[in-house]
C-alpha cells in the first residue's frame, strides 16, 4: 500500500507542475521593433539569405540577443524574414537555428533547428512571419544566444531576406557565413550595422522552489477534498 501511495503522490505532484506550466502565457523575451500585426514595417531589405543565385555568394546570417528577467522556454520567433520571388527560387527550406554564444563571440553549440516553407513574400507593407519552435529549449537568464538563418546547399535556388530594424540606433554584432563556410563576425572595424528586426517569445520557467511549493499546495487541496 505504501509503495502505491507514494507513486500516486509523485504522479499528482508532476501533474500539478505540468498543469501550471501549461497555464502560462507567452512572454516577450526580446523585442527590438515593437511590431503590431497589421502595421507597416516601413523598412527595407537588409540581409539577404540566399543560395545558388547567379553571381551572388551563398549567404547566411546570424543575429544575437540576451535573455533578461528569468529562464524561458523558446516558443516563437516573430520576424520580417520574407520570401523574394524575383529570382523564381523555392519558397521552402528556410532553416532557423538557435545557438549558444561561443567563446569567440560567434554561434557556439546548436540547441534547436526548425525548417519552414510558404513564407509571406515582400510587399509594400513588408509583413512578418511567425516561426514556431518546440517549446522545449531552455534560454537561461543573462545568457546571449544566436538565431541563424540558412537555406539548403542542394543546387536549387533560394532567395529570402531579413528586414533591417527601422531604428538605426539599435546596433549589434551579427554573424555571416558565405558559401557554407564557418561563421564569421559581421563587424567591420567595430562599426555595427542595424540589427535585423525580430521578437523572441517564450514561457517563463518558475524557480524550482516555486514549482514545489505550488505542487504542494495542490496536494494539500486534494487531501482536504478527500477528507470532506
Image (cartoon, rainbow, N blue to C red):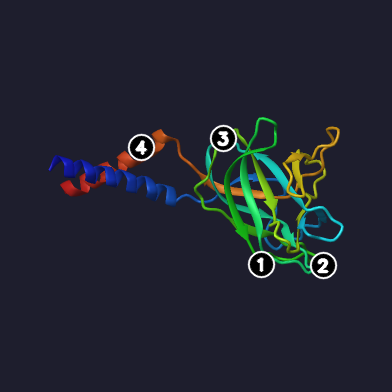
On residue 141, the disc is 3
**For the residues marked 4 and 3, what is the alpha-carbon distance in whole angstroms?**
20 Å
Q: Residue at x 78, y 66 (%)?
A: 123
On residue 118, the disc is 1
Q: Residue 163 at x, y = what percent?
A: 77, 54
Q: Residue 217 at x, y = what percent?
A: 31, 41
Residue nearer the viewer, 10 or 153 = 153
Q: Residue 19 at x, y = what percent?
A: 38, 50
Label 4, residues with CA under 10 Å away: few <14, some 14-19, many ≥20: some
Q: Residue 207 at x, y = what percent?
A: 45, 35
**For the residues marked 1 and 3, what is the alpha-carbon distance in whole angstroms?**
33 Å
Determine which residue is flagged by label 4: 212
Question: Which one is in front in this view, the residue at disc 4 or the one at disc 3?
Answer: 3
Q: Which circle's residue, 1 or 3, is located before the other in the chain? A: 1
Q: Residue at x 30, y 39 (%)?
A: 216
Q: Which circle's residue, 1 or 4, is located before the other in the chain? A: 1
Q: Which circle's residue, 4 or 2, is located before the other in the chain? A: 2
Amino acid at each position: 500500500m505504501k509503495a502505491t501511495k507514494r507513486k500516486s503522490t509523485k504522479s499528482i505532484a508532476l501533474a500539478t507542475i505540468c498543469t501550471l506550466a501549461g497555464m502560462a502565457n507567452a512572454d516577450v523575451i526580446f523585442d527590438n521593433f515593437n511590431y503590431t500585426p497589421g502595421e507597416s514595417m516601413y523598412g527595407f531589405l537588409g540581409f539577404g539569405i540566399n543560395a545558388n543565385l547567379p553571381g551572388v555568394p551563398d549567404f547566411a546570417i546570424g543575429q544575437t540577443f540576451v535573455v533578461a528577467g528569468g529562464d524561458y522556454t523558446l516558443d516563437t520567433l516573430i520576424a520580417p524574414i520574407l520570401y523574394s520571388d524575383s529570382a523564381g527560387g523555392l519558397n521552402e527550406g528556410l532553416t532557423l537555428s538557435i545557438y549558444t554564444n561561443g567563446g569567440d563571440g560567434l554561434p557556439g553549440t546548436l540547441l534547436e533547428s526548425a525548417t519552414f516553407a510558404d513564407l509571406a513574400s515582400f510587399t509594400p507593407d513588408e509583413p512578418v512571419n511567425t516561426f514556431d519552435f518546440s517549446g522545449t529549449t531552455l534560454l537561461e537568464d543573462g545568457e546571449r544566444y544566436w538565431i541563424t538563418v540558412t537555406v539548403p546547399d542542394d543546387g536549387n535556388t533560394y532567395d529570402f531576406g531579413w528586414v533591417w530594424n527601422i531604428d538605426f540606433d539599435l546596433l549589434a554584432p551579427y554573424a555571416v557565413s558565405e558559401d557554407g563556410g564557418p561563421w564569421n563576425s559581421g563587424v567591420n572595424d567595430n562599426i555595427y550595422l542595424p540589427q535585423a528586426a525580430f521578437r523572441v517569445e517564450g514561457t517563463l520557467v518558475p524557480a524550482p522552489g516555486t514549482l514545489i511549493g505550488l505542487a504542494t499546495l495542490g496536494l494539500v487541496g486534494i487531501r482536504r477534498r478527500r477528507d470532506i
